[in-house]
Image: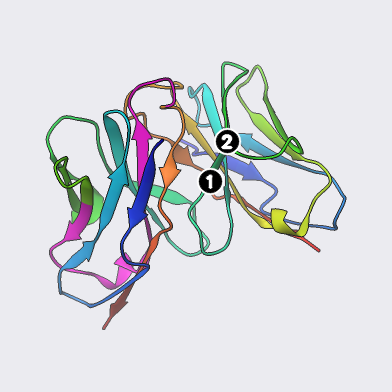
Amino acid sequence: AQSVTQLDSHVSVSEGTPVLLRCNYSSSYSPSLFWYVQHPNKGLQLLLKYTSAATLVKGINGFEAEFKKSETSFHLTKPSAHMSDAAEYFCVVSEGGGGSNYKLTFGKGTLLTVNP
Amino acid sequence: DAGVTQSPTHLIKTRGQQVTLRCSPISGHKSVSWYQQVLGQGPQFIFQYYEKEERGRGNFPDRFSARQFPNYSSELNVNALLLGDSALYLCASSLGASGRGETQYFGPGTRLLVL
């Protein structure tokens, strides 16, 4: 069975400082991993995804994530936070085999606040 | 291009009633998935449909059912509503059903309140 643990329920940063949102996963098969963002009263938007190509994945709006198999981690980073980055972020896993790769399993989310 | 659309945006029902939620996928997408997002939690998988057939089901009671139409739109039905069914219901579409790393595109959701 697949699962995701987001290690922080809330992260607060100042504008212009780096962002780190932590995610660990568990998967019986070779996983695909995603980060989605959810702004208030808006739908989920894909930031980036990992599918067994390069382990460092670049996404939209300056975000990137690194897949570390030995640590079963997929942390999301951004060098410099912007006020518009304030939102809920979800780490998501989808297994790549065994017939169960049709569903996404979400973490509980990390609320990012950006202070001026 | 239009994204995933869902209707209605908001809905208020009372316990015991039935509700139908609707979803139109992105043009060309043949797969629709449904998720339930309770306040303060991540979305949970309910169903996936591909080419009008159920391809997967999450851990939800039989009160939840869905179907997909020939035009690939989908409906989610919930019978005998409980207070705990209050949530944001999200629809997602994708090109196929089980491609590795297939991206699912989400609609804005239907917010259901059960009183």
Determine the residue positioned at 63% across, 37% down. Answer: B23
Where on the picture, by quarter, is residue A85?
bottom left
Q: Is residue A57 above or below residue A100?
A: below
> Which span is picked out in magenta?
A75-100
How many numbered circles are shown?
2
Return the residue at label 2: B58
Residue A66 image offset from top left, x and y in percent: 15, 47
Determine the residue positioned at 54% across, 50% down. Answer: B108
Where on the picture, by quarter, is residue B111?
bottom right
Return the residue at label 1: B44
Residue toward you, B43 or A43: B43
Q: Which chain carries label 2?
A: B
Kind of residue at disc 1: Gln
Residue A101 image offset from top left, x and y in percent: 41, 27
Residue A29 image offset from top left, x and y in percent: 30, 28
Kind of residue at disc 2: Gly
Q: Distance between the residues labelled 2 and 1?
A: 8 Å
Q: How crowded is mark 2: few (under 14 residues within 10 Å), some or many (20 or more)?
A: few
**Secondary element at tag 1:** strand
Q: Locate the N terminus of chain B by quadrant.
A: top left
Residue B53 image offset from top left, x and y in percent: 61, 17
Q: Earlier in the sequence, mark 2 or mark 1?
A: 1
**Secondary element at tag 2:** loop
Badges 2 and 1: C-beta atoms under 8 Å apart? yes
Determine the residue positioned at 62% across, 43% down. Answer: B6
Left or right: where does residue B55 sit relative to residue A68? Answer: right
Left or right: where does residue B8 sit relative to residue B108? Answer: right
Q: How crowded is mark 1: few (under 14 residues within 10 Å), some or many (20 or more)?
A: many
Determine the residue positioned at 32% across, 26% down. Answer: A96
Q: Is residue B33 magenta?
A: no
